[in-house]
Structures are given as C-alpha cells and as structure tokens.
C-alpha cells in the first residue's frame, strides 16, 4: 500500500464507521394489534331510572308497567307510559330481545328511532318508542363486568355520553308526541 492510500484510509475509515453507526435504526417489529374496546349497555334498571329522570325534567309523569295489546301479537308490558296518554317508552334489554324476538322492531340503521303501534280499537291507541340497549353502548371499565361492577355508578364521561344520546332520542319522540297530543 502506498502512503497516500494508507493516509486516506486512516481518515476515511473512522468517518465510514461513524456514518454506519449513525444510520437509520433497523425496522421495529409492528406493534401488537390493540384489542377492540369492550362495549356494554346500561342494564334495564339504570336505563329506566335515567329515562324517568329525563321525563320528569320535561314535566311529564312517567308511569311504570303499561299493558298494551299489539296487533296480531301477544300482550306486552311497556316499561314507561307518559301519564295517561297513549305514548310509552320501552327499553329493550338483551333479555327482552331474547324473550320477545321479532315482536319488537330491531334497532334502526344509522340510529333512526323505532316506534311500535298498539292494536287498533284501543281507547287510546298506543305509540311506543322502542329504545334498544345496543344503540346506547359505551366502553366498559371492565371487559367482563360483574353484578357488583354494574351496580356502581358509571364514570361521569360515560354517563354524559349515554344521557346525551338518550336525551336526544327522547326529545325527538316528545316533539312528535306533543304534535299529536297535548302532553
């Protein structure tokens, strides 16, 4: 090797080592896919208590347990009746869905409200707002909530979110009901 080449290597080799050492980091393995958040619904007692409170705020008197005859179907007990009017609200829990099946309309695509009509010939024909628990789900604090966890109050953010959705849907129904009948 000539002296010029040796001197050049002495200068270049450390620079090449530094360049290699400070090059891009090797590709990191992709992060593990996050599991989708577990969702749960209000249980029926929580939902009805919230609906009662919202109705009282609207100066309406919720009456629990209203028997309604449905056309070509069995009698049905509606969760809440709006005073002595022909309007009611049914919270459809998973148990209700299993029990009544197709008797109750499925949740509307895109969140449209579902109404259920009572049988013709009733003194006051019934019109029932059907609120399906699947439409009011929220992220669960615990992926498999126990009865004890379900009994505890929801987090403030969860309460506000579910309450806002219920309030919006209930308000839409009440606007319609008030246009049809003096509540």
Image (cartoon, rainbow, N blue to C red):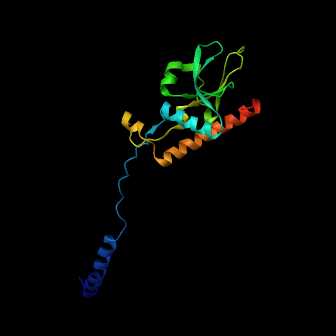
Depth check, front residue: 38 or 71: 71
Residue 168 lies, in percent from the top left, at 63, 41
| Residue at screen point 58% across, 44% down | 164
| Residue at screen point 73% across, 34% down | 178
Q: Residue furthest bottom?
A: 3
Relative horizontal placement of residue 151, taking residue 62 as reference (left or right): left
Relative horizontal placement of residue 9, taking residue 66 as reference (left or right): left
Residue 72 lies, in percent from the top left, at 64, 12
Total marks in image? 0
User: For residue 129, which quarter of the picture?
Assistant: top right
Relative horizontal placement of residue 71, taking residue 181 as reference (left or right): left
Q: Quadrant of the N terminus?
A: bottom left
| Residue at screen point 68% across, 37% down | 172
Residue 174 lies, in percent from the top left, at 68, 35
171, above or below 28, in the image: above
Residue 121 lies, in percent from the top left, at 72, 13
Q: Quadrant of the C terminus?
A: top right
58, above or below 100, in the image: below
111, above or below 20, in the image: above
Q: Can the viewer see residue 146 in this picture?
A: no
| Residue at screen point 58% across, 18% down | 76
User: For residue 151, which quarter of the picture?
Assistant: top left
Q: Residue furthest left?
A: 1
Q: Can the viewer see residue 101 in this picture?
A: yes
């Amino acid at each position: 090797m000539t002296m010029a080449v040796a001197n050049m290597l002495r200068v270049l080799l450390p620079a090449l080592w530094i360049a290699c050492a400070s090059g891009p980091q090797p590709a990191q393995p992709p992060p593990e896919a996050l599991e989708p958040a577990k969702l749960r619904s209000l249980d029926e007692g929580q939902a009805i208590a919230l609906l009662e409170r919202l109705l009282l705020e609207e100066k309406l008197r919720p009456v629990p347990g209203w028997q309604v005859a449905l056309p070509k179907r069995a009698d049905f007990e509606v969760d809440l009746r709006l005073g002595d009017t022909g309007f009611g609200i049914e919270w459809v829990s998973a148990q209700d869905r299993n029990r009544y099946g197709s008797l109750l309309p499925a949740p509307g695509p895109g969140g449209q409200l579902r109404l259920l009509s009572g049988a013709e010939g009733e003194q006051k024909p019934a019109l029932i707002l059907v609120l399906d628990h699947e439409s009011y789900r929220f992220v669960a604090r615990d992926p498999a909530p126990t009865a004890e966890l379900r009994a505890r109050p929801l987090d403030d953010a969860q309460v506000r979110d579910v309450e806002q959705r219920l309030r919006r849907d209930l308000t839409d129904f009440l606007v319609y009901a008030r246009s049809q009948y003096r509540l």
